[in-house]
Image (cartoon, rainbow, N blue to C red):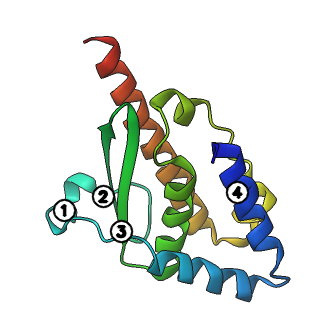
């Protein structure tokens, strides 16, 4: 699936829920499906700054595609990072850098999160783009 096809699929899934309590429940369920991050990566080195909850994020470049892994100590935040991984993992660094993450606005995520969670969302996206930028810079120097 293309990046936009994944986003459209998420928009379709969230459109099935009329109220935000159901959408929060969906986020919680998505977080439960997130594969666990390596315990060795649950350190300050992998913590995302700017999130009120603890969110650990790491990325590897495999065959030119970025593979993200993450975890959080908060169930809704874990669901949010799970959504971001669903959209951005297995993409080239350039795709990640160019991505217009319109699904965030389309499903109403930003305006239905508390200001601290919303700041955390921005910090997660920023960190994922930083990994992509670092991988792109590294591959351009090889």
Residue under numbered circle 1 = 43
Which residue is disc 3 drawn over?
Answer: 71
Name the disc covering residue 104, or none: 4
Do labels 1 and 2 touch, CB within 8 Å?
A: yes
Q: CA distance from mark 3 to mark 4?
A: 19 Å
On the image, numbered disc 2 is attached to which residue?
Answer: 47
Mark 3 crowdedness (10 Å alpha carbons): few <14, some 14-19, many ≥20: many
The residue mark sitting in front, 3 or 2, is 3
Q: What residue sits 82% from the left and 85% below the top?
A: 19
Residue visible at 49% across and 63% down in the picture: 81
Q: Dot 4: few (<14), some (14–19), or many (≥20) neighbours within 10 Å?
A: some
Tell me which numbered mark, 3 or 4, is placed earlier along the sequence.
3
**Mark 3 or mark 2, which has the lower sequence index?**
2
The quarter of the picture where residue 132 lies is top left
Q: Nearer the viewer, residue 135 or 67?
A: 67
In this rendering, position of residue 38 left or right of residue 5: left
Residue 110 position within the rendered picture, expressed as x and y whole percent measured from the top left: 70, 62
**SS type, badge 1:** loop
């Amino acid at each position: 699936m293309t990046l936009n096809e994944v986003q459209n699929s998420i928009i379709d899934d969230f459109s099935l829920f009329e109220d935000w309590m159901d959408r929060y429940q969906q986020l919680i369920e998505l977080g439960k499906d997130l594969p666990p991050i390596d315990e060795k990566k649950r350190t300050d080195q992998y913590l995302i700054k700017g999130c009120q909850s603890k969110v650990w994020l790491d990325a590897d470049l495999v065959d030119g595609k970025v593979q993200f892994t993450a975890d959080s100590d908060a169930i809704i935040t874990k669901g949010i990072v799970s959504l971001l991984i669903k959209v951005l993992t297995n993409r080239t660094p350039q795709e990640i850098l160019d991505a217009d993450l319109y699904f965030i606005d389309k499903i109403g995520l930003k305006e239905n999160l508390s200001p601290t969670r919303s700041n955390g969302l921005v910090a997660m996206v920023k960190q994922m783009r930083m990994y992509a930028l670092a991988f792109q810079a590294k591959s351009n120097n090889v």
